[in-house]
Amino acid sequence: MERDRFQTTQWDLIDAAKRESDALARVLDLYWPPVYAFLRRQGLSPERAGDLTQGFFCDVVLSRDLIAKADASRGRFRSFVLASLQNYQIDDERRAKPERSVLSLSESDLANAEPDANDDPKAAFDRAWTASEINEAIAIVRDEFALRGKASVWEAIYLALIEPARNGCDRPKVADIAATFGLTPPQLSREIYKAKQMIRQRLGEMGRHDESCAPNWPPTPPGDAR
């Protein structure tokens, strides 16, 4: 099943994960970093946090069918996952640890998911969760541009908007990027504006059930009317 057929909002993805293996794999990819960040800020080593992350997704998310129990009408998926994780961490100390391999986590994956050293465990979880939601919204909008035959336009938008926002650096000149992709500066500016609105719309849809989302992302630099 192709991603664009089910990924219109976070809850659409979660509902699809109850039926579709592709959607379930996407949910695992999206939400292991918040779990790992929470465990690391609990004081666990990268190796131990990685093992417990594997265990949570194997023993709870899959074996106990956590996704099937998720219900948009009952509140935020984020809170549901965090409560389940905390219970799992307590229970895990009481039992032997079987081999698990539901996630392929390399050393570089774990390094990239390291939380801010100043965050407490819950703040680390929330920060990583929000980052996952932002990445999901960006992926959805990227796919929507591709479906409209605008993959190259998205590449220009990524360089002009997404990459600077993610890295916290100054945005390059629109005119320079536009010329590289055969666009005029006004054309690229309009496409950037559309992309920003689309990303915020997706985040707003996710935020209907999860207040940790960031509907004002990507940030608008001072003096940017759009």
Image (spheres, rainbow, N blue to C red):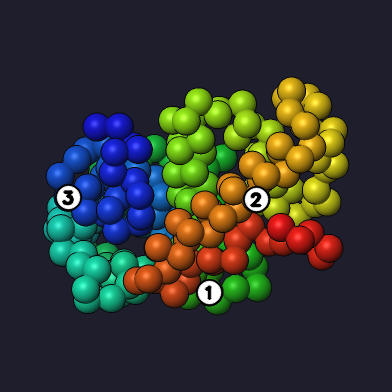
**Quarter in which the C terminus is drawn:** bottom right
Q: Which mark is residue 123?
A: 1
Residue 110 in view, yes or no: no
Residue 130 drawn at (x, y percent): 50, 63
- Residue 225 figure quarter: bottom right
- The residue that mark 3 highlights is 18
Q: Residue at x 85, y 42 (%)?
A: 173
**Quarter in which the N terminus is drawn:** top left
Give the alpha-carbon distance from disc 3 to disc 2, as whole Å. Answer: 35 Å
* Label 2: few (<14), some (14–19) or many (≥20) C-alpha neighbours in 10 Å: some
Residue 208 in view, yes or no: yes
* Label 3: few (<14), some (14–19) or many (≥20) C-alpha neighbours in 10 Å: some
Look at label 2 and name its amino acid. Answer: Tyr
Q: Tell us which disc is closer to us: 3 or 2.
A: 2
Give the alpha-carbon distance from disc 3 to disc 1, as whole Å. Answer: 28 Å
- Vertical placement of 142 versus 193: above or below? above
Q: Could you say which is closer to the camera, residue 104 or residue 133?
A: 133
Whether residue 52 sits left or right of residue 108 in the image: it is: left
Q: Secondary structure at mark 2?
A: helix
Q: Residue at x 85, y 33 (%)?
A: 176
Q: Could you say which is closer to the camera, residue 6 or residue 169?
A: 6
Q: Which mark is residue 193?
A: 2
Q: Could you say which is closer to the camera, residue 113 or residue 152?
A: 152
- Vertical placement of 84 versus 12: above or below? below
Disc on the earlier residue, 1 or 2 = 1
Q: Number of labelled discs?
A: 3
Look at label 3 and name its amino acid. Answer: Lys
Q: Tell us which disc is closer to us: 1 or 2.
A: 2
Look at label 1 and name its amino acid. Answer: Ala
Give the alpha-carbon distance from disc 1 to disc 2, as whole Å. Answer: 31 Å
